Image: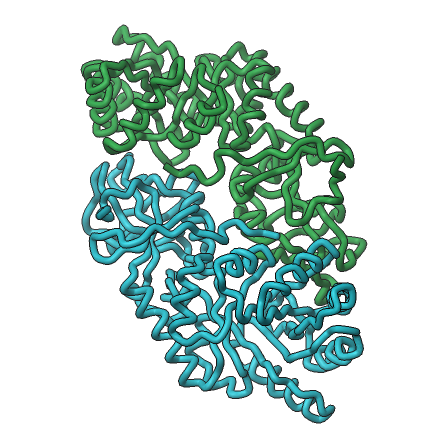
Chain colours: A green, B cyan
Amino acid sequence: MTKVHDLETPVVTIDLDRLEKNIARAQAMVDAAGMKHRPHIKTHKIPDIAKMQLKAGASGLTCQKLSEAEVFIDAGLDDDLLITFNIVGQAKTEHLMRLSDRVNKLSVVADNEDVIRGLSEAGVRHGRDVPILIENDVGFGRNGVQSPEAALSLARYAMNMPRIKFEGLMAFPTTGEKAVDYFNRAVELFTADGIPLPILSGGGTPALMTLADFPMLTEHRPGTYVFNDVMMVHSGYASWDECALTVRATIVSTPTGDRAIIDAGSKAITREQYYVKNFGKVVEYPGAVVANVSEEHGILDFSGAENRPKVGEVVNIIPNHCCVCINMHDKVYGIRGEEVEIEWPVAARGKLI
Amino acid sequence: MTKVHDLETPVVTIDLDRLEKNIARAQAMVDAAGMKHRPHIKTHKIPDIAKMQLKAGASGLTCQKLSEAEVFIDAGLDDDLLITFNIVGQAKTEHLMRLSDRVNKLSVVADNEDVIRGLSEAGVRHGRDVPILIENDVGFGRNGVQSPEAALSLARYAMNMPRIKFEGLMAFPTTGEKAVDYFNRAVELFTADGIPLPILSGGGTPALMTLADFPMLTEHRPGTYVFNDVMMVHSGYASWDECALTVRATIVSTPTGDRAIIDAGSKAITREQYYVKNFGKVVEYPGAVVANVSEEHGILDFSGAENRPKVGEVVNIIPNHCCVCINMHDKVYGIRGEEVEIEWPVAARGKLI
């Protein structure tokens, strides 16, 4: 059996014990809140891991793009999928219809009339209902209608469009008082108008900690919890020993007393920063950080660490954001202790359409 | 023939007229400086473009990793390659030896004794000389020995190691007075010791503007000049109409008066920033910028622009850094006017080993 130290660096490994615990923990949290669990596959992009999530109790999956959904459908994950991205243009709505033929239920989101009209026209062309959720901007400043009133107005538009089956509302991320108020107000408005909201869908891994604040939600869509990363530790959701994904890298140079260079840069770890000033944590050297990255070089700063590494040594880097990190790799390795248990192609890597 | 507007977004297109002009311009600059031109393939990762560079007068190619070099060798580019990254560990030195068997000349760099010893042992195992350049840190703070004195000392070590063929010095980037002083002092030291320096290799696209300050260099290794990007415009090397690579993206939402969302985020454009506060320039709307990106969403800020886009409209984004952008795409399209002339697989995308 291949050993971890036989893997050529840079390479992503997944600690399978931690992965299994992470999946069980989040499922228990969503179960305790009485919601359905619809994990986002963007974090792993690997059908086998989606199967683990479903086996643990998830009732469906979330994908961001059509071509991602296609990868999971090809792998037999054809029960209940939600694509949380506006689908624009006839090439893409036709793609959606082809995928819908192969899935028990395939839902999408929309935040404007143009998108709904395109979906409606596709539904009419193919004699098929298109289930949709209205996307809401509850504070993130990305997609979404800007108020519960606008959601109601767009829902009315949707309900009048042929073949559109309005099913409820979604938002990302569902954290904070503003989001609570938004959903409460939306429920009030829709109820007053007699429009049912069978699905109210929230999202985000840190949001798992505050599900109790959102009793109106019917389902939750977390992603990052399967692996965790620096961002999740920073959020308070995870501890370092719940981080399942690391980038193994080799020290190739120690140009100065405090500086070491690894063979993993932005092409292996990415340049994502979020809440921190650096680009990743060095597991073996507390106090050392990835101070900078260029494409193939990671520049480690050891000024805050007690010990110093040698050329040829292998270190594990916990990336700031695991979802974007795995997208840089064609394959990853599931490990248990020193054994490599499985090689996984990152099947939905780079799926942009 | 496929038209540009038939391409599904997000997608990278390369303006072939601009690409050809960019290649000719840089070649003329290196020719005028009396240096050899050894472009870095990391910017394009496409053997056909390397062939255009060689046809225009380049005398060799630069790769960063073994697996990149292998892609170009497989495509018949087997005359003169330099890998500018420390090669550490027996798996990789064996890989180097296998590649060396297939190339007229394959050189590598080293900045420490461990790397040189590993290369020497591989050379001895295979009865093959390994040509090396010593890497120097002339101010960038990445790899490299820290002084001309250290370079001389490491060169002496290299010259005493079996099968190591010391050929000279390299650095990246070669800009600024500190770099000039470094190379002048190095030439002085090596000359005083009677050690020939047949190759002195500089790098960087902005450095093309100051080649005259480095008369001691024998070759130059620019990369980004083939496409250019926001960073190159910022450096003063390129103008916007010399940017050959853009990410075509579709407006999928206009949630507020000043905000629009495109279907290209960090997975298509990356989060690289460098000198700017945003993540890319919107060609069709001067004053609009990519204000933020998540994985699949680009958040455009139109507050500085005169006009507003509609859902369904396609815009072209000039990325901040084209080299990392192309690494996110499995294929790109070479276009001339409205015609798609060629589809190129990004053959060396994701080659990390």
Residue shown at 63% from the left, 64% from the top: B101
> Which of the 4 image quadrants contains residue B110?
bottom right
x and y, in percent, of residue A163 in the image? 23, 15
* In this view, B213 is above or below B38: below
Q: Quick one: quadrant of the N terminus of chain A?
A: top right
The reply to whether residue B281 is in sight is no
* In this view, B73 is above or below B183: above
> Which of the 4 image quadrants contains residue B265?
top left
Residue shown at 45% from the left, 49% from the top: B270
B52 on left or right of B196: left
Judge by depth and name the residue closer to the eye, B128 or B222: B128
> Which of the 4 image quadrants contains residue A120?
top left
Count of marks placed on residues: 0
Q: Quick one: quadrant of the C terminus of chain A?
A: top left
Q: Residue furthest top?
A: A194
Judge by depth and name the residue closer to the eye, B41 or B71: B71
The reply to whether residue B326 is in sight is yes
x and y, in percent, of residue B122 in the image? 75, 64
x and y, in percent, of residue B135 in the image? 64, 72
x and y, in percent, of residue A196 in the image? 32, 8
Residue shown at 72% from the left, 63% from the top: A254
Residue shown at 30% from the left, 12% from the top: A190
* In this view, B7 is above or below A242: below
Judge by depth and name the residue closer to the eye, B296 or B193: B193
